[in-house]
Image: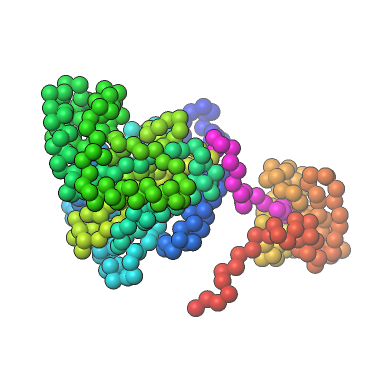
Amino acid sequence: MSGEDGPRNQKPPFQTPKGVHDILPGDHEYYTFIKKVVRHRLRQAGFRRISTPIFEFTEVFSRSIGDTSDIVSKEMYTFQDRKGRSLTLKPEGTAGVVRSYIQNGMQELPQPVELYYIEPHFRYDRPQKGRYRQFFQFGFEIIGESDPALDAQAIYLAHKILDDLGIAQLFTLQLNSIGCQTCRPQYMNILKDFYFGKERSLCADCKHRMEKNPLRLLDCKEEDCQILAQIAPKLADYLCAECKQFNEEVKEFLGELKLKYVENSSLVRGLDYYTRTVFEFWDKTDGAQNAIGGGGRYDGLIELMGGQPTPACGFAAGMERIIANMKREKIRVPRKDDLHVFVAQLGQVAKKKCLPLIVDLREAGIKTMGALGKGSIKTQMRLADKFKVPYTIIIGITEVREGTAIIRDMKVGTQKTVPFDETVTEVIKLIGEKNLDLYTPGEVLY
Ligand code: HAM
């Protein structure tokens, strides 16, 4: 679109910063639909919604996600407030939820505490397809209990939501166990030994990772690093007996739920807080590149963040990636924004009659747009066409004098005159009661 008086083809002076975008009304229909599905599935399973602030003290993220992770070392939007305190826009949801669980004494509630969120997040990623600097995630966390059945249930819920959205078949479930504080350190040493002497084949990032967090070497997307990762010792061979047993049980429960999974020994995830179960949903064609979502167990995080030792697991998915896949699959979502009726009027007296009529139509659940400007009836009818309404109500001087209104069927091009007082009832008959947009704020409000 170009402004009226600016030269065409010239960029408007203000653009969104790189990597962020407006959510225009057409896309909001997808966001609304996803929110509905997420809320429905999670409410059914006993979850309640939580929103944590858009920004937190930087340490909430650096301590939980890990200083060596890509997110903390390269991707955070960190700034100082006016008193010099370091704050960060949230790059993910789990850290804030855990901070809130501890701060609000949720350990006193019946456990597990099940929470979900639908929020914008911020990462200073290199913008590309499916990778933005502001993106929406829905996610959920199950805090306060440790059982492989809970991991399986979390995975199943994630799958079920993708299924409800019509895209589950596009993804494979990748599953791994990354062990615990007992078995992982020993494996890290074995991994370091394996990479010793092979540093020259590693990318610059991985050279650094070798010092700080060798587990992440397995996750690198660079081709040479991947070749090495494939022949590196597997964590599965070094899991302690408890982790092995836990992992076996997760797989058994997934079997009970008839969920197919791929055992992927190099799946480690990009955040430091995980223990044991980790999982991701990978695009069947793009693989890890555009994972739609991921999660896992994080039994040490609540204690690390200053709470009592408390086990937990969870999942989050990227909503922009979900929408891109829904569009690719040509999945249509309900279009609740389409108007039912356009009200056109001619002259000041008719306009006065129209105002309360518009109010009555809307009260009755009829989505109504009124042309209350000064355009000719021809201009208003052209506008009605552009809004693609099925019906237009026309009130001119004659209709006011006779106490009537004209209802025009815009598709067929026919029109009929009805008594003014019966306009709302007539329109309801035409569009059908089940199509009305009625808002019921609840039976009793306290
Ligand atoms: P994550 O894998 O970092 O996990 O992010 C989850 C999903 O968010 C990704 O699979 C992707 O779909 C989406 N996402 C991430 N970064 C971007 C981006 N720059 N642009 C668009 N979409 C993106 C977490 O965030 C964990 N907190 C998940 C979790 C919850 N684990 C336990 N509980």
Q: Is residue 58 visible in this depiction of the protein?
A: no
- Residue 396: in magenta span: no
Residue 288 is drawn in which quadrant? top left
Q: Is residue 42 left or right of residue 197?
A: right
Per the picture, the main secondary structure of the magenta-coloured stretch is: loop
Q: Of 239 and 319, which appears nearest the observer?
A: 239
Residue 231 in percent (x, y) is at 25, 27
The answer to which quarter of the image holds residue 105 is bottom left
Q: Which residues are magenta?
A: 327-349
What percent of the width, then of the height, locates residue 48? 42, 63
The x, y position of residue 11, in whole percent, is: 46, 31
On screen, residue 50 above or below 285: below
One can see residue 44 in this view: yes
Residue visible at 41% across and 41% down?
261
Question: Which residue appears at 43% of the width and 48% of the height?
Answer: 255
Q: Residue at x 28, y 50 (%)?
A: 245
Query: What residue appears at the point 45 percent right and 42 percent down from the top-left corner?
Result: 260
The quarter in which the N terminus is drawn is top right
Q: In the rendering, at what x and y percent does residue 302 appear?
A: 23, 58
Question: Is residue 155 toward the left or the right of residue 105 in the image?
Answer: right
What is the total number of numbered labels drawn onto the structure image?
0
